[in-house]
Amino acid sequence: MQKLKLILPIVISLAVVLALVIGGCAPKAGEAIPLKIGQLNSFTGDLSDFGGAHRNAGQLAADHINLAGGVQGIPIELVARDTATNPVQGVDSARALVDIDRVAAVVGALSSGVSIAVAESVTGPNQILQISAASTSPAITVLADGDFLFRTTVSDAIQGVIMGRLAKELGYDTASALYINNAYGQGLAEAFKAAFEAAGGKILALVPHEGVQPTYASELSKATEGNPDVLAAISYPESAQIYLREALEGGYIDTFILCDGTKSPDMNEAVGVDKLEGTHGTAPGSALTDARRVFETNFESAFAVVPPLPYMDTTYDAVVLIALAAEKAGTTTDSAAIRDALRDVANPPGEVVGPGVEGIWKALELIRAGKDINYEGAGGSQDFNEKGDVISTIEIWKITGGEIVSTGRYELP
């Protein structure tokens, strides 16, 4: 029976592909239309360090869904467009996904500012389901999005608490933060300040900065006035690698605490792996559950390596959840109906299912049999509340031996 479960999805998928080849890829009148999922990604811009890995995570999910037989018996399609980590281009790309590509749902964006702009201008008004796997701004929780914006990652209202608490635990009495001037940076900086001061520390300055600049000397001067014990780098890799290098070379400060936006091997290498040795950081992340192990094993098999970047697992989960909700709703085109079924497949009660071809195949079979499911994802439990948020843990990580490694600590406030 176990072998049958493993083999059957592949047989189903091959049969579907063969049928498409024989009958032509374009659906005929009366035939099912494939589920099309859009992905708003940062292939360029300040978050481009993350773009390739997120594309791969989304594609892995699509491949697994199709190997499990697809949605409504038809392979799904994933269409990716670049936001350049910019709200204006993000909105343009979202419009193209909705108006030209005719997607039924959107995964993304990475940047909170882009996700918010897209929700307000495109997906919300058009009643298109949007699930971000990486947008962590607390502002998303209270956004008037008509219940069409969800996220598979936890709010920075939680990360900021852990980050502030960690800074005090590491022995720092004073701190400043240099943050990207958008919803993500401001939200996390303010949450960090509140938590650090609640723990007995003192924040000397919160200094915003714009996207990639040739120099951050002015911002660094403001952020290091009064000689704080530590500087929180709450930014994206392309910006942070410039000002971290400037901070070190210019003698501004040499002690930092990092976060999800600065959890980047490329940034670490650009600054100099020996320069950031021993630096701690935080990022949404879950312990190595069976579900996460399945994801990482499959990701490594497909792409040779699992980079230590955040949100690949939650990107995978977002794609899978859209597909399961579409199967539950019995539609590949009605985004509102897919949205309405999302909590049914993500939240308890129901039989627990997980990632991977076998897990998705089981989930689809249960849905078709009229049974409830509860998807427990690669990125943790994906139980959406009334605001479309999930509650999950924050991982504490560290740069050791020039590499980004987990400390094995996963914390809640």
Image (cartoon, grey):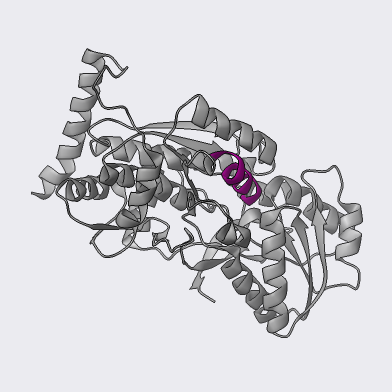
Rendered residue at 54%/54% (across/down): 310
In the rendered structure, the answer to whether residue 236 lies left or right of residue 145 reads right
Callout count: 0
* Residue in front for this viewpoint, 387 or 209: 387
Residue 284 at x, y percent in the picture? 53, 62
Rendered residue at 30%/47% (across/down): 356
Residue 192: quadrant of the picture: bottom right
Residue 82 at x, y percent in the picture? 59, 33
Residue 254: quadrant of the picture: bottom right
In the rendered structure, the answer to whether residue 136 lies left or right of residue 351 reads right
Location of residue 162 with respect to 74 vertically, above or below = below
Quadrant showing the C terminus: bottom right
Residue 264 at x, y percent in the picture? 62, 51
- Name the main secondary structure of what is drawn in magenta: helix
Magenta stretch? 112-122
Q: Is residue 129 visible?
A: yes
Rendered residue at 22%/14% (across/down): 23
Rendered residue at 23%/36% (across/down): 69
In the rendered structure, the answer to whether residue 186 lies left or right of residue 289 reads right
